[in-house]
Amino acid sequence: SPSAGDLSYQAQDKFMLHSCPILCVAFSRDGELICSGDQQGAIKVWRYRSGQCIRTIQGAHSEGVTTVRFSRCGGQVLSGSFDGVVRVHGLKSGRVLKEFRGHTSYVNHALYYADGARVLTASSDGTVAIWEAKTTEMAKRMSPPRRHAGDEATVLSVHPYPKNVDYFVVCNRSPSMYLMTQEGQVVRSFECEGEDAKDFVAACVSTRGEYVYGLAADGKLHAFQMETGRLEETVEVAEGEPIGLCHHPLQNVIAAFSENPKVKIFGV
């Protein structure tokens, strides 16, 4: 597959552009398409090799699009937004095919789960929700443990556990991440200890599920053993306010990005 340096349209200073800031990006499973969502609620789908925009969905959401994900077949796009709604859009028609309502605040992360039969979402209302993909019915809603009564820590992301389809890792804005079951039970916690422990702002899981990585608000990456919860290593990876993490699908490589205009890529 071509590297970024082989993309002729970028070499000619032609880029995949929105008219306002882009908040999320995702590749299709075959790597041929890219989907992007922007601050004004629009979604665009592009051909990776040519940079051609093949679909623009204006007004996909009434507010900024925070998360996008292709379906397994690549014919649909799952999206979530600051408007609190999750939608499925048809790539050919550009129409909304399904809508999932129930969160009471921003949807920060949405993905297909259990071979596409379910949708998993994370929200600033402090909950993770599991939805039936066919009926859009909310099958389960759960909250990670709270440090103090009345706390509703924003749930930033959810990550399937490759070794067990019933488990997933939950990252909320706190110094702890959790391996949870579909029933809402906590199997294991991954914690930054100490009074000065910073909240996690992003997470990812290694390809084989052996490690979970948490990026804290101080720019430090914490690597935990999945099986034991033990902290293996802490490395400073982000300059400026950290924003996110991304794990390579095949190799032990992580990309971290922050307000500093650099993407740091490193082996783990």
Image: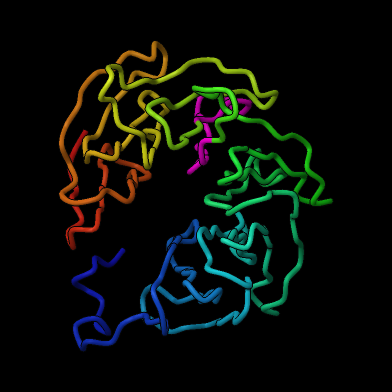
Residue at horizontal 52%, vertical 68%? 64
- Quadrant location of residue 106? bottom right
Q: Is residue 163 above or below residue 259?
A: above
Q: Is residue 55 left or right of residue 100?
A: left
What residue is drawn where x is 63% and y is 73%? Answer: 62
Percent position of residue 187, x then y:
54, 15
Q: Position of residue 234 (x, y in %)?
A: 20, 26
Image coordinates for residue 161, horizontal then vertical, percent: 51, 29
For the C terminus, the quadrant is top left
Magenta-tinted stretch = 153-169
Please tell me which residue lies in front, 47 or 196. Answer: 196
The picture quadrant where one finds residue 120 is top right
Give the residue furthest to the top: 228
Between 266 and 109, the one nearer to me in the picture: 109
Does residue 149 appear left or right of residue 257 in this picture? right
State the count of labels.
Answer: 0
Residue at x-position 24% and y-position 81%: 10
Q: Position of residue 9 (x, y in %)?
A: 27, 84
Tell me the colour scheme of the image: rainbow
The answer to whether 245 is drawn above or below residue 70 in the figure is above
Q: Residue at x 59, y 59 (%)?
A: 80
**Front residue of 73 and 81:** 81
Q: Is residue 10 magenta?
A: no
